[in-house]
């Protein structure tokens, strides 16, 4: 089995998963960090409060980034977290046209040897590389959240 296939198998074992509090969602982010490599793009789909930012916090913590630095880049659109494997954290919520992200240097981010994580990724679907990993988080009532791999629309099973 190729390394890529082995990683894909491990990722498909990681999800689907249901979490019952934000720490459990962060733990999934931490686990994910072990399978992602520089250059990978993780697209996050889910409503406000789904837990996208908490997942990114866990991912970043596992990569040696101070989790306290991780918040939704709602207004700045991009946060850059330096680390041996840096993370570029994008929030596309306020992006009206996908081209705005190109103006911010999105192509350079993709080729910078970082992990690129995008909240509200469906808003910039046309810019995402075909090998992007798409992860959907859905509210399950109360603090329950359902996490699964999904299509680029964010609503279909992979
Ligand atoms: P998003 O980035 O998707 O808007 P955040 O991660 O910023 O969401 O916020 C998620 C909110 O939901 C936080 O207030 C968090 O404490 C709460 N929460 C409750 N249960 C969970 C859970 N299972 N996973 C993640 N967050 C949860
Ligand atoms: Mg967020």
Image (spheres, rainbow, N blue to C red):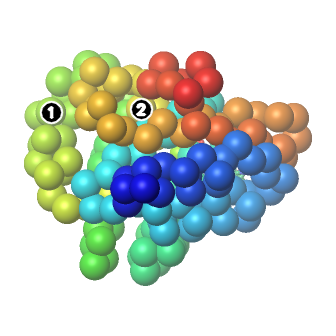
Quadrant of the frame with the N terminus: bottom left
Position above or below: 86 against 15: below
Say which element carries label 1: helix
Looking at the rendered structure, which numbered label has been put on residue 102? 1
- Occupied quadrant, residue 99: top left
Residue at left 53%, top 60%? 32
Picture coordinates of residue 46, whole percent (x, y): 60, 32
Q: In which quadrant is the C terminus drawn?
A: top right
42 lies left or right of 154: left
- Residue 49 vs residue 11: left or right? right
Name which of mark 1 and mark 2 comes first in the sequence.
Answer: 1
Where residue 75 appears, as percent x and y from the top left, is: 36, 42
Residue at 56%, 56% in the rendered image: 10
Quadrant of the rendered structure where residue 77 is? top left
Q: Position of residue 6 (x, y in %)?
A: 47, 57
20 up-or-down from 103: above or below: below
The reply to whether the C-beta atoms of the residues labelled 1 and 2 are less than 8 Å apart is no
Tell me residue 78's x, y (percent): 30, 49
Numbered disc 2: secondary structure: helix
Seen from the viewer's position, the closer of residues 54 and 110 is 110
Residue 80 in view of the camera: no
Q: Which residue is at the far right? A: 142
Q: Is residue 144 left or right of residue 103?
A: right
Q: Residue at x 79, y 51 (%)?
A: 19
* Left or right: 129 as drawn, with respect to 89: left
- Mark 1 CB within 8 Å of ligand 2: no
Q: For the residue carrying disc 2, how many other residues have a C-alpha within 10 Å: few (<14), some (14-19), or many (20+)?
A: many
Q: Give the CA distance from mark 1 to mark 2.
A: 14 Å
Residue 20 shows up from this direction: yes
Question: Which label number is shown at residue 121?
Answer: 2
């Amino acid at each position: 089995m190729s390394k890529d296939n082995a990683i894909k198998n491990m990722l498909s074992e990681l999800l689907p998963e249901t979490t019952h509090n934000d720490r459990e969602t962060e733990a999934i982010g931490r686990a994910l960090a072990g399978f992602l490599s520089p250059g990978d793009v993780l697209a996050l789909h889910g409503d406000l409060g789904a837990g996208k930012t908490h997942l990114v916090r866990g991912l970043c913590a596992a990569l040696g980034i101070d989790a306290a630095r991780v918040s939704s880049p709602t207004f700045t659109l991009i946060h850059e977290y330096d680390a041996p494997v840096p993370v570029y954290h994008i929030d596309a919520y306020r992006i009206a046209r996908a081209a705005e992200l190109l103006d911010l240097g999105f192509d350079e981010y993709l080729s910078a040897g970082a992990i690129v994580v995008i909240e509200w990724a469906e808003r910039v679907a046309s810019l995402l590389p075909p090998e992007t990993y798409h992860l959907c988080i859905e509210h399950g009532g109360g603090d329950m959240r359902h996490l699964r791999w999904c299509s680029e629309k964010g609503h279909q099973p992979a």
